[in-house]
Image (cartoon, coloured by chain):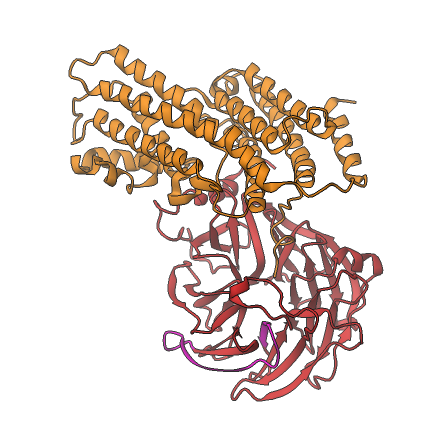
Chain colours: A red, B orange
Amino acid sequence: MEINRRLFISGLAAASFITLPSTIARADNQRPTFITTSRDRLSGKFVLTCIDDKLEIAWDSPLPGRAHDIVVAPNMNQGVVIARRPGLFAMVFDIDSGDPITTIEPISGRHFYGHATFSHDGRTLFMTENAYDEGVGVIGIYDAENQYRRLGEFKSGGVGPHDIALLRDGHTLAVANGGIRTHPDTGRQKLNLETMASSLAFIESHDGRMIKNISIPGTDSQSLSIRHMTVTKNDIVVGCQNQSPSHVHPLMYRCGVAKQNALVALVMPAPMKKQFSGYCGSVAYDARSNTVAVTSPIGGVVGLWDSADDFAWLGNVQLPDGCGVDGASGNGGFILSSGEGDLSLISSDGMSRAQENYPFRQWDNHLVSV
Amino acid sequence: MNSRFILLCIIAISALLALPVLAAPDYTKIEARVQSMHIIPNYQALAGSTGKMATAIQATCAPNASIETMLMAQGYFQTTLDDWQSIQHFRSGPVALDDRHSRLQFWPDKRSIGGRHLSRFLVKGSNAELAPEKMSTASVALQGFPALERLLFDDMPIGLELRPDEILSRCHVAISIANNIAMISTELLLESQRAHAFGTESKLAVRAMVNDLITGVEVIQRLKIQMPMGKTKPLLKRAENWRSARSLRNIELNLKALRALTLALNDPADTTDPESKLIYDQFDIAIATARNLGADMGAVLRTKDGVLKLRSLALTLDDLKKLIAIYMTDRLSVNLGFNSLDGD
């Protein structure tokens, strides 16, 4: 690739943390398109970044450390970027500039797990957290209209809650309990692999009441950790990480949101199952084409399923170290990102529409369409 | 069938072959070896030359400073840049602290932030801001080699005499910057001499070193060569150190230093390993190509086939990068992947 302006901006930003304002302002009045985080290979620092529909960087904003997911408030004015587990910050930022607005810190005895979701009215933020001394997962509740004051918490229904989503009914929370216990004293070390139990919990957001808590069927599924999810028209689709070296077990499951009865495995060709290497990184849905996309950075591959055709396997896109994915607005399809600096817009059938490479950026696990 | 095609075939075939299971590398030993063979000697050289450069620039402030004094200061700048370019590729370890890398060299600087900050400083600064503790917290674009290069090569002579509208003499600003560079270099030397200077376990330190090695090659390829080549026409002022006409000399020194780092990461006693030899040979081709092009990239870009020659060098570096990515990561059992290595 020839050097270009985008590459230069990337390089410049790496060297600009002291002399430039905390963010590089947008040059126009367009709304941001995608927001993600990355590690700058030149400086080693972590950055929150807005990318426009031309895959150019619209703004950068320094982060206090490595982050994980980003959620955008329904009114589209604010976003929250949550620290990677064991996370100790969640930075609220201005969507148009990246400027920090406030920072949420976990209360004593809790740390963040990297994911959150807003209530549909935008007044409440729900975050997955670890009550690490008790070894249980909780959902922290924050008042978005009052400086994100912590209002309380309720149990997540398992250990190691990771991704969280609010269903279209506006009051049911779906929580991916990964099942793996960790403690800040031992970093990211997994403490209970022998006994881990993952689940998908449906929780009433108003009072924390457990509606249903379902597990992956099968006697040999104990090593599967449900981590990420997306909500399609009628289903929740979850992606797992297999804690055992076996690569034969299905990694993707769906569950109807109406009945919330059971998790059903999605079909994936055997060679692809092997390439996924027991690891799903991100899960996303494109409503225009009813397509679900799942990334595996270890396998360097993105799988595609048709949710309108009983989740039939559509095919794959190869993307080394690819992890970030979300449905692209406008013409639909997906945006993908990789730890090797790639950004790619693809259509729902996997055809490339546009791509760009930022060689000094390592795009992190997740990105979101705004 | 050209040599590049053959090399790419070797890379591809080798990558497909099952690689033998090797014993886990002794990371403590490797870290210590890189530290003693490569990092400390290079920071030692830098600390020494920056001190001498500061002294030489001091002389330019003498009331009777001659043009020879100025040329001598330029000469010391060139020597010091040689030493910086020989350790510039390290972005982890002590240089990652306190923004030292950017403070030594804020580059690339497409928006000419360094020029604007320097002009403003000369017009609105004060003598108090020349004190070491003030300069070390000033704009990074003002603190290091690029600002000093502007003073020494753009605006000769830099003597005591004030220019219209300016309230600081250029030689005093140059002395302050040179002292700041010397101070940072001394800090780097002292901190690099400590055991486990990278402040982390040895395997992670070695992984950071391999990352710096590959990033170093990529910086040369993309920022130092392809950026000044431009997309449609050469952009001479995008070359590193174009004012002192040494852009290609930098690249030659960078490559020699990266080769030395590779040697230190491998076992230097083992000269028979065929994969290492492939890497060293590729380094040697790139070094010879850079040397044969001369010192100044601007001069090359002004020739008819200059862009082609530089493109050829960039391709050589692309192959080199692939060789390092395949063999060094495997040999040292370090994975440079980001999400695949450490996802969630």
Q: Nearer the viewer, residue A58 or B215?
A: B215
Q: Residue at x 69, y 29 (%)?
A: B276
Indicate the position of residue B149 as horizontal and vertical percent values.
Answer: 34, 26
Q: Is residue A159 above or below residue A351?
A: below
Q: Is residue A134 magenta?
A: no
Indicate the position of residue B29 as horizontal and vertical percent values.
Answer: 59, 37
Q: Is residue A159 magenta?
A: yes
Indicate the position of residue B163 as horizontal and vertical percent values.
Answer: 18, 25
Q: Nearer the viewer, residue B134 or A70?
A: B134
What residue range appears in magenta? A143-165
* Relative horizontal placement of residue A87, taking residue A102 as reference (left or right): right
Q: For residue B26, what is the image quadrant?
A: top right
Q: Is residue B83 above or below residue A106?
A: above
Image quadrant for the N terminus of chain A? Answer: top right
* Relative horizontal placement of residue B26, taking residue B75 as reference (left or right): right
Q: For residue B174, what is the image quadrant?
A: top left
- Counting every numbered tag in the picture gives 0
Indicate the position of residue A37 as horizontal and vertical percent values.
Answer: 52, 56
| Residue A212 in view of the camera | yes
Q: Nearer the viewer, residue B324 or B66?
A: B324
Q: Is residue A47 above or below residue B100?
A: below
| Residue situated furthest right in the rendering | A270
Q: Nearer the viewer, residue A46 or B341?
A: B341
| Residue B222 in view of the camera | no
